[in-house]
Each structure stands twice: as C-alpha cells, then as structure tokens.
Image (cartoon, rainbow, N blue to C red):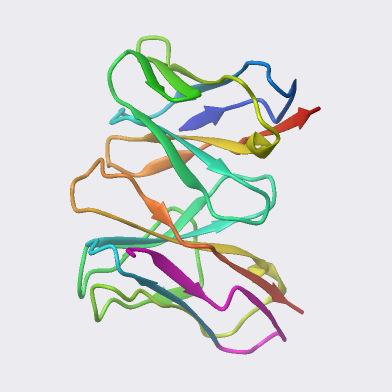
Amino acid sequence: EADIYQTPRYLVIGTGKKITLECSQTMGHDKMYWYQQDPGMELHLIHYSYGVNSTEKGDLSSESTVSRIRTEHFPLTLESARPSHTSQYLCASSGLADTDTQYFGPGTRLTVL
Amino acid sequence: GQNIDQPTEMTATEGAIVQINCTYQTSGFNGLFWYQQHAGEAPTFLSYNVLDGLEEKGRFSSFLSRSKGYSYLLLKELQMKDSASYLCAVMDSNYQLIWGAGTKLIIKP
C-alpha cells in the first residue's frame, strides 16, 4: 500500500543534541516537503524538494537542513536542538504537477528540554 | 502580505449541517484546498477547488468564489467522528500553499 512514513513519532531530547527526523514515501512522488506546526497554528513550510539532489528553503527561517539522495527519502536534521525547536514536524509528498495534492505523514512531535 | 482567515472554533450538533468559511488574500491563486486534521494526527485531504462553484463529495461539499476571495466547506449529517480541525490552504502564484490556522469543529450529541 502506498504511504508516507515518519520516524520517530515522538522524541524528547536535551538541548544541544543533533537529531534527524526520518521521512519516507512509497507513493512514487517527486516532490517532498517539511512543515512545522504548533498547536492551533497554521503549517509553516521549512524545506521542500522537487526531486533527487534538489532542496529549497521555505518561508520559515529554520536552523535545520535536509537532503534528497533518494526519491523516496527526505530526512531533516537539526545540528543542535534548542527548546525553541519544540513543535510538530510534518512531512508531505506530492506529484510533479504544480497543483498536485500534498499527502502527509503522521508527524513527529519533538520536545527539546 | 498573504492572509487566510477562518473562525477559530465552531460547535454543531450531531446530525446537523455546518458551514466553515475561509477568506483569503494571496499573491496569485492556483486553487484552494481543504484538509481535515484530527487532534495529534496529520492533515488528510478533503477537497480542491480552482473554478468558481460548488464541488460535492458525499457528505462534504466545498464552494469557491474567486472574485470574493471566499470559500466554504459544508458538512452534512454530522457525525461524532467529524470532530476535528478543518484547514483551508490556498496555492499562491509560486505554487506554494498558504495555510490558515484551522477551524476546530466540536460536535455535540
């Protein structure tokens, strides 16, 4: 079954740690996205990719980085986590057409102490 | 700037009908999406409108007026499982999605 996966689902870590949030999809989609969402607030785009070796920064200033070495995999890395990074991180994917629907993974809820 | 407005919260009764409004001001328009998001879960796609008018899909319908910068999501025969947040998102001239903060819908028996 085609789907989009994120691991871990929940993560509690200390300040200064390096973390990688994993996102994989079996939808055959070219485009992938990372969003940040705080409770009751809108989604903010932090990174996106059109395909392998393509990465772009979104509207939200972020201290994270991404890579796209394989079509199905789009990990997000925080080099040094801070309490301000505490949030829900949502990964999404879509087809190549500009107006294709984005489909979301289950999310990673990150807490930085 | 770009702006999406939705009511923060609405309450409705099981079996009734509810209309959730969304108004937008964006740089360009390439369609409007509605998503449903249950608490603690990911958004799931409900509908996409790019032309004016009403799109019906089962119990859910979505309406768009581009001249008024306005859309609504209509939910009929409400069920308890419809309790969720409903997110309105507009695709701008750069084909980026601009998201509203969502409307939390509470269904009472």
Position of residue B55 in the picture relative to residue B22 (left or right) = left
Q: Position of residue B46 (x, y in %)?
A: 44, 36
* Residue found 64% across the figure and 25% down from its top: B78
* Residue found 40% across the figure and 77% down from its top: A75
Q: Is residue A7 magenta?
A: yes
* Residue found 40% across the figure and 65% down from its top: A4
Could one spot residue A101 in this view of the protein? yes
Q: Position of residue B19 (x, y in %)?
A: 59, 17
Residue span colored magenta: A1-18
Q: Position of residue A6 (x, y in %)?
A: 48, 72
Could one spot residue B1 in this view of the protein? no
* Residue found 26% across the figure and 44% down from its top: A100
In the rendered image, the residue lying farthest to the bottom is A17
Position of residue B20 in the picture relative to residue B80 (left or right) = left
Q: If the image is split into quadrants, where does the C terminus of chain B sit?
A: top right
In the rendered image, the residue lying farthest to the right is B109
Looking at this view, is B36 or B98 the one in front?
Answer: B36
Position of residue B50 in the picture relative to residue B4 (left or right) = left
Q: Is residue B33 magenta?
A: no
Looking at this view, is A18 or B107 the one in front?
Answer: B107
Give the number of marks.
Answer: 0
> Quick check: A73 above or below B89?
below
Position of residue A10 in the picture relative to residue A2 (left or right) = right
